[in-house]
């Protein structure tokens, strides 16, 4: 019954009044329309059906929208239908992942936190690539943790390898969704797998290499097409200066986001508007907001993602304390490391990147944040008879209440 209520709530949040934003980000809606009438535009992610130029991202997110438009016709609902469906799918996938290791109620709570996080409630009703990116990162995390469930036995090792291959393929398609951003989950993945896999170190490395090869194949076929197909037979790679997807990946959409170099931006200092968010975000201290550890707690960034962020970071420490001296292969510990690495690395990169940075990027933090809050709370419940838990719990509640009261005052 709780699962049914949770899925009904997800459908309500992501589907009711779905067309309120019209065509949402019209930049990507135009590309979806082009892909629905031209298979060449579909393949390349062209902005127009004449295939003059692509959007400034790989095409994976556009493929789903273009197929929807090709099947059901062009309107706001068909453009946004895949995004809402991905919101429900991500919610259920979070539940399925957390439930396996922390119990049913931890899974239910994590899903409600996820879907009620403002930026998540918005971005699965919008046609930016972030919805598919989040779904693929969540799926990759699920596959990683499933790979760690099998004992060190030939049949178990084969299953583990295939789950790792699936995790790598999902990350590869994540690259075809939003390029290098998907790689921010990999440090946590690598640490979790290398520390907790039940096999010897050689087998752990081989399984990791299998995942890496799968990731390269899943992303590399399309990247290879941009290199081997003559420039005259494909559209210009949007956002690049020399008609090169590799340049786009490591320049404007890669290290340029970290360093602040905006060569290739449609309008320097601005971005594509739509989905109910202003284009540039907070402007204090620079075009894209003040950098630093407090960045995501301040301005409009804070009201999108940081309501329960203190609890999430505390949840990493609390859950590891509760797991304590459990065996090295405890998958609960692996889940904390994987989601904790996802949250920490992405939070730090977002906090200090000097280039283009919109508030809606923070949706990439929502699944990890929701899971860590839920398992942190569940861990406190497990340890409720211990003195430290009785001291920490009211402190966290009081601090979170004060912080959320401060955030509410900004609206």
Image: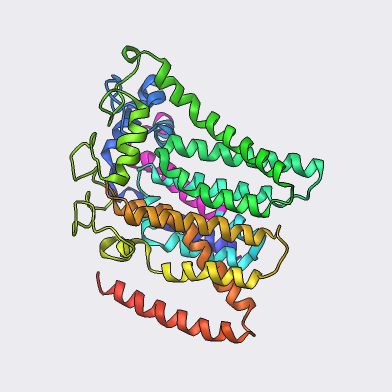
Is 176 left, or right, of 167 in this rendering? Answer: left
Q: Is residue 103 magenta?
A: no
Q: Is residue 85 visible?
A: no
Check the image and name the residue furthest to the front: 202
Q: Nearer the viewer, residue 197 or 315?
A: 197
Q: Give the vertical position of 278 relative to 252 (above or below).
A: below
Magenta residues, start to end: 70-93
Is 137 left, or right, of 405 in this rendering? Answer: right
From the top left corner, tell me how far across and down residue 101 is, in percent. 66, 61
Q: Quadrant of the C terminus?
A: bottom left
Q: Is residue 91 magenta?
A: yes
Quarter location, residue 224 = top left
Q: Nearer the viewer, residue 17 or 112?
A: 112
Is 332 left, or right, of 269 in this rendering? Answer: right
Q: Quadrant of the N terminus?
A: bottom right
For the point 22% across and 57% down, which residue is it? 282
Q: Give the vertical position of 16 relative to 80 (above or below).
A: below
From the top left corner, tell me how far across and down residue 249 is, in percent. 37, 34
From the top left corner, tell me how far across and down residue 3 is, in percent. 59, 61
Q: Nearer the viewer, residue 54 or 311?
A: 311
By secondary structure, the bulk of the magenta-drawn segment is best described as helix
Question: How is the model colour-coded?
Answer: rainbow
From the top left corner, tell me how far across and down residue 156 is, in percent. 77, 44
For the point 56% across and 72% down, which residue is it? 318
For the point 33% across and 38% down, which residue is it? 253
For the point 66% across and 50% down, which residue is it? 146
Q: Is residue 253 visible?
A: yes
């Amino acid at each position: 019954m709780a699962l049914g209520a949770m899925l009904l709530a997800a459908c309500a949040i992501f589907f009711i009044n779905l067309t309120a934003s019209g065509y949402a980000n019209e930049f990507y809606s135009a590309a979806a329309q082009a892909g629905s009438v031209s298979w060449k535009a579909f393949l390349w992610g062209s902005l127009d059906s004449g295939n003059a130029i692509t959007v400034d991202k790989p095409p994976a997110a556009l493929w789903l929208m273009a197929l929807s438009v090709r099947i059901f016709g062009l309107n706001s609902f068909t453009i946004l239908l895949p995004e809402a469906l991905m919101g429900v799918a991500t919610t259920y996938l979070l539940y399925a992942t957390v439930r396996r290791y922390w119990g049913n109620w931890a899974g239910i709570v994590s899903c409600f936190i996820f879907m009620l996080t403002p930026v998540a409630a918005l971005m699965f009703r919008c046609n930016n690539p972030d919805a598919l990116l989040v779904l693929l990162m969540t799926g990759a995390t699920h596959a990683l943790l499933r790979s760690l469930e099998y004992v060190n036995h030939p049949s178990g090792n084969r299953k583990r390898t295939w789950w790792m291959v699936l995790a790598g393929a999902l990350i590869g398609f994540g690259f075809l969704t939003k390029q290098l951003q998907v790689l921010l989950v990999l440090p946590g993945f690598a640490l979790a797998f290398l520390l907790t896999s039940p096999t010897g170190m050689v087998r752990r490395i081989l399984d990791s290499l299998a995942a890496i090869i799968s990731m390269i194949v899943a992303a590399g076929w399309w990247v290879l097409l941009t290199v081997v197909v003559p420039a005259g037979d494909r559209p210009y790679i949007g956002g690049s200066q020399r008609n090169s997807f590799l340049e786009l990946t490591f320049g404007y959409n890669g290290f340029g986001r970290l360093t602040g170099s905006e060569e290739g931006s449609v309008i320097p200092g601005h971005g594509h508007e739509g989905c109910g968010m202003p284009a540039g975000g907070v402007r204090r201290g620079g075009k894209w907001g003040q950098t630093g550890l407090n960045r995501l707690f301040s301005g409009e960034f804070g009201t999108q993602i940081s309501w329960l962020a203190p609890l999430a970071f505390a949840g990493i420490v609390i859950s590891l304390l509760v797991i304590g001296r459990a065996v090295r292969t405890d998958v609960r510990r692996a889940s904390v490391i994987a989601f904790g690495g996802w949250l920490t690395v992405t939070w730090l990169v977002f906090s200090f990147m000097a280039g283009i940075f919109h508030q809606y990027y923070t949706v990439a933090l929502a699944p990890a944040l929701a899971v860590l809050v839920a398992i942190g709370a569940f861990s406190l419940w497990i340890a409720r008879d211990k003195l430290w838990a009785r001291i920490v719990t009211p402190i966290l509640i009081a601090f979170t209440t004060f912080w959320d009261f401060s955030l509410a005052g900004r609206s």
